[in-house]
Amino acid sequence: MSDKKARRIARGTFLKGAGATLVLVAGGGVWRVADQGVFGVGEGPAYEPWKNWRPNEGEGPIELVRAAVLAANAHNSQPWLFRVEESRIDLFADRERNIGTVDPYLREMYMSLGCALENLLLAAEANGYGHELALLPDSSNPAHAARIDLTPAAASTTELYEAIPDRHTNRGPYDTGRAILRETLEALRELGEEDPEVSVFWFATDAERRRVGDLILEATEAITADEEQSVDNLGWNRFDWDELQRYRDGLTLDVFIADPLTNFAAKVLPPPSREQSDQSWLRSTREDVVGTAAAFGILAVNDKWEDAQRLRGGRAWQRMHLWGTTLGLAMQPLNQMTERADREAQSGIPHPSSWISRWSLRFSSSSVRRTAHLFALACRATFVRASCAMR
Ligand SMILES: Cc1cc2nc3c(=O)[nH]c(=O)nc-3n(C[C@H](O)[C@H](O)[C@H](O)COP(=O)(O)O)c2cc1C
């Protein structure tokens, strides 16, 4: 039996008696405070990329990759590979880092690559490179997502570039006391729609938010009720400090739990079971996510099956999130509906009607109906609550 397995069993046993738990938490807790990095948030090799993201003199195009890897990406799976030459960077999908039944058609993988591409191009402009971009340059190799040819150019830094290390997905409760202005949503939409293949729709009235929220919750419940998808969904959680520092990927306790006391307790207590994790995800989706969102958005592309359009959708999201960061907006992608739709389509799970058509049926806007079957990414946004630490 491996050490890891042995430890899991010990923790499971430990949970059985409440009396014993208290004694052992007190005793074992001392060890876990140091062991689980309770006071080390943002420290260690896993967090170095945020500290060293700026180019070093004379480094060459590899410096652009430092900015690219700070991009949003599904489950923090970092599904990218870069080939760097003197005046060219090739971006590849690392299909081994697929998130399984959560993304059976690699939709989120290609959107993640699009996010990285956006950061890379912003970094190129800020660091004196002109660029020529070709999406999917090799028709015989779909893993070859993009080729960027670089030439010397005048450097032009933008606020989006400067926001790269500060952008984080915010999963905490949002500030319901501050309304998000229509003009802000409109400006975000215009930014996303700079690419003619991308459409952005916002749902901000009470009635709209209720209907979107209900669908998100239903999809979340369906994922937790599907064992295989639930396992894959939780598979990238890195709740063990050593594991987090070793793999430098996945989702940590810190990105889920902003409240310091709850965060502390989660780190020193034994890891939860799958069922407990699912219940906690459902609760936070209901209360913190759906319950406090000022607006939900849909990012749609014209053909959800085309990898090039997914790359474009990812670029648009990254741009929107960076701009939101400059304003102090909290934002979070929310993909339960699309993840569930893909899962049901791929595995032939019967459903009265797909999530996508149910979505379009619930909204009267003709523009949404027209593109609803194409949507790629849902998100929410509002201002950051002051106490909600991001990372
Ligand atoms: C295509 C895509 C889908 C995502 N889906 C979700 C989601 O459904 N829920 C969520 O909380 N975060 C989601 N994220 C956010 C990622 O988990 C996040 O970007 C990643 O963990 C890295 O963290 P960061 O954004 O704070 O840098 C998604 C990101 C991308 C690019």
Image (cartoon, rainbow, N blue to C red):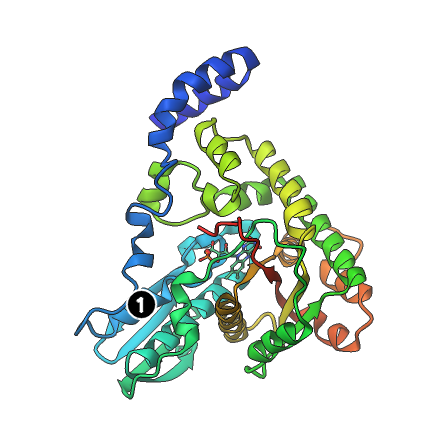
Note whether 366 is above or below 259 in the view shown: below
Say whether residue 239 is left or right of residue 305. Answer: left
Rendered residue at 30%/84% (across/down): 155
Q: Residues within 10 Å of mark 1 (few under 14, many from 20)?
A: many
Residue 136, image quadrant: bottom left
Q: Is residue 6 visible?
A: no
**Circle 1 is placed at which residue position?**
65
Q: Amino acid at mark 1?
A: Val
In the image, residue 330 lies at what x, y percent?
55, 60
Q: Is residue 233 visible?
A: yes
Viewport quadrant of the N terminus: top left
In the image, residue 39 lies at what x, y percent?
36, 37
Rendered residue at 47%/41% (across/down): 253
Note whether 299 is above or below 15 in the view shown: below
Say whether residue 309 is left or right of residue 131. Answer: right
Residue 140, image quadrant: bottom left
Secondary element type, mark 1: helix
The front one of 108 and 176 is: 176
Note whether 18 is above or below 44 in the view shown: above
Tell how many labels.
1
In the image, residue 188 lies at what x, y percent?
59, 74
The front one of 116 and 350 is: 116
Say whether residue 311 is left or right of residue 86. Answer: right
Residue 83, image quadrant: bottom left
